[in-house]
Amino acid sequence: MQYDHILIRYGEMSLKGKNIKQFIIRLQENIQAKLKDFPNVKVKRTQGRMFVLLHGEDPKPIMDKLQKIFGIHSLSLAIMVDNDLEKIKEAALYALKENTDVKKFKVSVKRINKDFPVRSQELNQILGGHLLKNTEDILVDVHQPDLEIKVEVRLEATYITSSVIPGLGGLPVGTSGKSLLLLSGGIDSPVAGYLAMKRGVQLEAIHFHSPPFTSERAKQKVLDLAKQLTKYGKAIKIHIVPFTKLQQEIFREMPDEYAMTIMRRMMFRISERVCEQESILSLTTGENLGQVASQTMESMHAINEVTNYPIIRPLVAMDKLEVISISQEIGTYETSILPYEDCCTIFVPKSPKTKPKRVKINHYESKHDFAASIEEAIENIETITVYDKKDIEESFSDLF
Ligand code: ATP
Ligand code: MG
């Protein structure tokens, strides 16, 4: 006897009315994509839930993958047996014994198959009795059990599951369209990307870099951060914008205290152009209210003037500590704190305006024509796609 299935529950998605079918199909595809390393494994849909059929594979690494897939509410290891009382008893006992440290348990039977000859209540008692008889120092406690063994008698078979392991929740990546993540090398923007993905958004990323002031290693850092995000979704296309010339022009031509805000406006302008090229309908940033000079209400107002694309700012109202804690959980923190220079830290004006005004900025911007440099930056964008490990092997095998 061993666990041969993983039961996947998809919580929030069951509320999604008409779209539910699409959501479930997308979730199944996302799961299948992440489990490609395990060729024997199959993913099956049934009424209201999904099963992974293990076919002899070790469940541990598969559970690890499933715990990084948005749209999964919770998971349980499960045993499937025929609708046969003796087999159900044996499986329930296995499920109980697999969990050490259990002092109090409870059996919950759900009989969906009304042809099964033993009724729920009676089956509860039979199984409870069987488990008590075959274990020592374990009691039944229906109110506060350490472990609930769930038995579901369905038409095709009976499933026995024990511990419920939480999933990430959220919506399957790809069900909420695409967004262009402004990805710096910092702590915030990868977390913003992660949270957008959690709401079903598929990401592309854009990064502004300023060689030789920013190094190859700083660029690599950004690629590494994006790669970390692919663990929670699909491959990510990153548009690397050569920003040096435009940035130097801004700092040469514009008043020092407005340079930062104008630089941000340029980032949004260029990002919007990439969105147009890539049919993307929104931007995502790691902006957070009140952190630094570029993130006051006034500066957001000034920066936001140049685009009417929706801007997803998942961190806008979070505390820095909350953001750090998420970045540690998702594995981007260690990379984010590496000390490589960022284009924004290189060209720091001495006293940036914390309350820039749109009229003033428009006045200064009208004095100089940046169009040629913007076009040049866009023309020289380098696009790199980063993959979760398995995807890379696939893209190679596509070549042959
Ligand atoms: P982060 O930790 O994400 O770098 P931050 O707290 O340093 O954010 P800012 O430097 O004000 O804040 O940047 C605000 C947002 O602007 C970033 O979260 C990111 O979305 C975007 N951004 C900043 N610098 C770059 C860059 N070089 N390339 C792409 N996007 C950037
Ligand atoms: Mg930063």
Image (cartoon, rainbow, N blue to C red):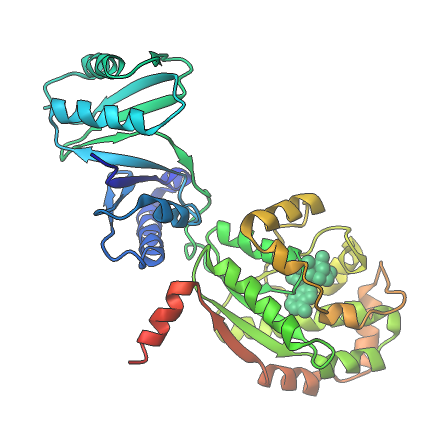
Residue at position x 42%, y 64% from top?
A: 389
Residue at position x 59%, y 58% from top?
A: 190
Q: Residue 358 falls in which quadrant of the image?
A: bottom right
Residue at position x 59%, y 53% from top?
A: 191
Residue at position x 50%, y 54% from top?
A: 197
- Please state which of residues 119 and 99 is positioned toward the viewer in this rendering: 99
- Please state which of residues 23 and 144 is positioned toward the viewer in this rendering: 144
Location of residue 12 in the rendering, given as x and y in whole percent from the top left corner: 42, 39
* Side of 326 where 299 appears, left or right: right
Point out the residue furthest to the front here: 136
Q: Residue 234 falls in which quadrant of the image?
A: bottom left
Location of residue 298 in the rendering, given as x and y in whole percent from the top left corner: 79, 57
Location of residue 229 in the rendering, given as x and y in whole percent from the top left corner: 51, 58
147 to 5, vertically: above or below: above
56 to 101, vertically: above or below: below
Quadrant of the rendering where the N terminus is positioned: top left
94 to 142, vertically: above or below: below
Point out the residue furthest to the right here: 351
